[in-house]
Image: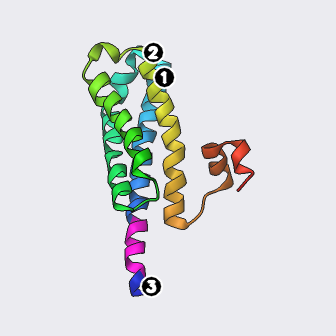
Amino acid sequence: MAAGDDGSAVRRLYLSVYNWVSFFGWLQVLYHVTLALLGSGHQAVYAAVKLPLLFSQTAALAEILHSITGLVRSPISATLPQVGARIFVTWCIVWSFPETQSHVLVTSLVLSWSITEVIRYPFFGLREAFGITPSWLLWLREGPSTSALH
């Protein structure tokens, strides 16, 4: 490795670890959502996923720093509202108002977030770690209409 590649290698290692840790956090959320839905119904979902959900959503604050520092190509104008809105909903609404936690819409939101993220994070994790994105993962991430264009 050339001296100039050190920063790039550290960047890729950091982003790879970040993406895989985030993936496993969201995988845990999805696992607990599924168990709660099958076992007790939507009223039990938030209680089952509270800690991994709070961890996974809060960890996404790093994505704002990644964008600001240029570690990733995502513009701050897109990253800040996306992450900010999720943090607001997670902490300022659902966590702050316990009466919302058993609502079916919270279950729907947590389920959709977790499905999305268990696709997104390995997509970027594989790309950073190995420079690859398997076609099936690209299809899951972008859908059939756009993956044919790549």
Residue 144 visible to the viewer: yes
Span colored in magenta: 5-13
| Residue neighbourhood size for the residue with mark 1, other residues' Cα within 10 Å, grouped as few (<14), some (14–19), many (≥20) | some
Contact between marks 3 and 2 (CB within 8 A): the answer is: no
Q: Tell me, for residue 35, which label it has, or none.
A: none
Q: Nearer the viewer, residue 86 or 81?
A: 81
Q: Which residue is mark 1?
A: 108
As drawn, 108 above or below 21:
above
- Locate residue 2, reporting x and y percent: 43, 87
Q: Which residue is mark 2?
A: 104
Dot 3 falls on a residue whose secondary structure is loop
| Residue appearing at x 30%, y 33% in the figure | 51
The amino acid type, in three-letter code, at marker 2 is Val
| Residue appearing at x 37%, y 33% in the figure | 85
The amino acid type, in three-letter code, at marker 3 is Met
Does 115 appear in magenta?
no
Magenta-highlighted stretch: main secondary structure? helix
| Residue neighbourhood size for the residue with mark 3, other residues' Cα within 10 Å, grouped as few (<14), some (14–19), many (≥20) | few
| Residue neighbourhood size for the residue with mark 2, other residues' Cα within 10 Å, grouped as few (<14), some (14–19), many (≥20) | some
Contact between marks 1 and 2 (CB within 8 A): the answer is: yes
Q: Earlier in the sequence, mark 1 or mark 3?
A: 3
Q: Tell me, for residue 1, which label it has, or none.
A: 3
Q: Marks 1 and 3, how far apart in space?
A: 47 Å
| Residue appearing at x 26%, y 18% in the figure | 97
